[in-house]
Amino acid sequence: MKTCLYVYNQTLIEVYCPFDVVVRGNVGELCKDDFVQVTDVKHDGDGKIIFNVNNKLYYAYHFELLL
């Protein structure tokens, strides 16, 4: 099971795939304020987090976690 760790209000939160996020700005086929589901979490060679959304890969900084 894939997970992702977030720090929110000085609390460490672990979320499990799939989880919901909102798109921060237009990127690829996604539009700002779209609600989408992350089905997998990966990282690139530099350690940046990548989300799988609709079978496409996007950097995590394009999204905001819905708590």
Image (tube, grey):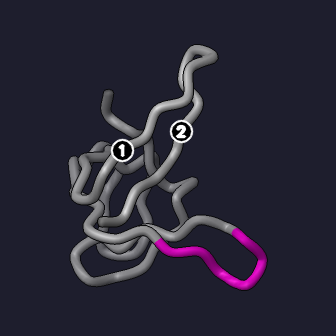
Q: Is residue 44 magenta?
A: yes
Q: Residue at x 29, y 61 (%)?
A: 38
Count of marks, rendered view: 2
The quarter of the displayed image where residue 64 is located: top left
Tell me the residue at 50%/55% (across/down). 62
Mark sitting on residue 15? 1
Q: Is residue 19 above or below residue 29?
A: above
Instruction: Indicate left or right for 24 with 55 as reference.
Output: right
Image x and y of residue 1, in percent:
30, 66
- Determine if the magenta segment contains residue 41: no
Tell me residue 60's x, y (percent): 52, 59
Density class for disc 1 (Cα within 10 Å; few <14, some 14-19, many ≥20) is: some
Q: Main secondary structure of the magenta part?
A: loop
The span shown in magenta is 42-47
Residue at (39% x, 39% y) in the render:
65
Q: Secondary structure at mark 2?
A: strand
Tell whether label 2 touches label 1 (CB within 8 Å).
yes
Q: CA distance from mark 1 to mark 2?
A: 8 Å
- The disc placed on residue 6 is 2
Q: Is residue 8 above or below residue 50?
A: above
| Residue 10 lies in quadrant | top right
Q: Secondary structure at mark 1?
A: strand
User: Vertical placement of 22 versus 3: above or below?
Assistant: above
Residue 4 spot, x, y in % from top left: 46, 52
Name the kind of residue labelled 1 in the image. Answer: Val
Q: Amino acid at mark 2?
A: Tyr
Residue farthest toward the right in the current orientation of the protein = 46
Please report the residue visible at 65 percent of the width from the left and 81 percent of the height from the top: 44
Q: How crowded is the residue under tag 2: few (<14 C-alpha within 10 Å), some, or many (20+)?
A: few
